[in-house]
Amino acid sequence: MSMERTLPTELTVQVDHLVDAPEQDGVYQDSAECAALLLVGAALLLSPPTPRPKKPAKS
């Protein structure tokens, strides 16, 4: 005894639309742009911290 399931056509159309949705704006497509952003981010993380002001000597 096999049981076949059928989905309503409206639901299948919605699922197909979600699966085939275009990519959103703001997503970086250019690999050179991604590489540049990665290098800038790494340089900021690896840069030395800013110097702190020296405390006056206690007498």
Image (cartoon, helix red, strand yellow):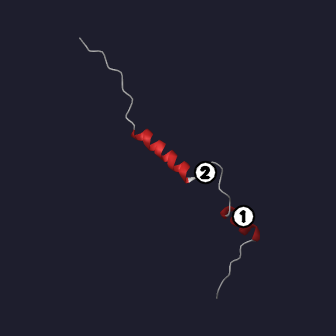
Question: Relative to 58, is 8 above or below?
Answer: below
Question: Where 42 sits versus 55, above or below?
Answer: below
Q: Which mark is residue 6?
A: none
- Residue under the point 76% across and 71% down: 9
Residue at position x 50%, y 49% from top? Answer: 35
53 shown above or below 28: above
Closer to the camera, 7 or 56? 56
Question: Which residue is rendered at x = 51% and y = 45% of the image?
Answer: 37
Q: Which mark, by number, is residue 27? A: 2
Q: Position of residue 22 (x, y in %)?
A: 68, 58
Displayed quadrant of residue 3: bottom right
**Which amino acid is tagged 2?**
Val
> Relative to 10, does residue 36 appear above or below in the rendering?
above
**Dot 1 lies on which element?**
helix
Report, in whole angstroms, how far the alpha carbon at label 2 lies from the one at label 1: 23 Å
Q: What kind of element bears circle 2?
A: loop
Q: Is residue 8 left or right of residue 2?
A: right
The outermost residue toward the top is: 59
- For label 2, the crowd category at 10 Å Cα-Cα, with few meaning under 14, some 14 to 19 and many 20 or more, is few
Locate the C terminus and report the quarter of the image it occupies: top left
Q: Position of residue 29 (x, y in %)?
A: 60, 53
- Mark 2 or mark 1: whose residue is earlier in sequence: 1
Query: Mark 1 belongs to which amino acid?
Result: Gln
- The residue pinned by badge 1 equals 14
Marks 2 and 1: which is nearer the front? Answer: 2
Question: Is residue 41 left or right of 8 when viewed as pictured?
Answer: left
Tell me where residue 42 sits by quadrant: top left
Residue 52 % position (x, y): 36, 25
Residue reaching furthest to the bottom: 1
